Image (tube, rainbow, N blue to C red):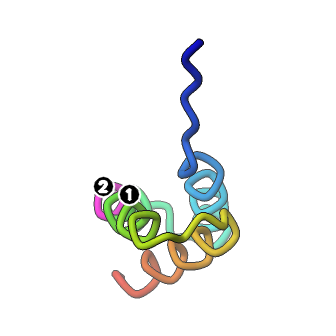
Amino acid sequence: MHTEINIFEKPIQRIRKTCELMGLDADFDRKLPELETYLEGLVAEGEISEERLTVSGLTFVKQAR
């Protein structure tokens, strides 16, 4: 049996929703490819907390403005 676990799904959904609420929709859409790469790097360094990935991702999107 093959099960795929995507650790990025929830953090990216949360980041997207937060960006929508903050009026940063365009920033999120523009930065999504870089955000995914950034989050992959954090996971490669050992980060597995969805909450920490979410906060780090939000910080990344806001700084990228």
Give the quarter of the figure containing the C terminus: bottom left
Task: Kindly identify which residue carries mark 2.
Answer: 33
In the rendered image, which quarter is residue 22 located in?
bottom right
Is 61 or 51 nearer to us in this picture? 51
Tell me the number on the disc at residue 36.
1
Q: Nearer the viewer, residue 32 or 44?
A: 44
Q: Quadrant of residue 49?
A: bottom right
CB under 8 Å between callouts 2 and 1?
Answer: yes
Counting from the top left corner in percent of width and height, residue 32 is at 37, 57
Which residue is at 51% across, 83% downward?
59
Residue at the (39%, 56%) spot, across then down: 29
- Residue 53: mark: none
Task: Locate residue 19 relative to residue 21 in the image: left or right.
Answer: left
Tell me the element at label 1: helix
| In the displayed structure image, the side of residue 15 where residue 65 appears, left or right | left
Q: Which residues are magenta?
A: 30-34
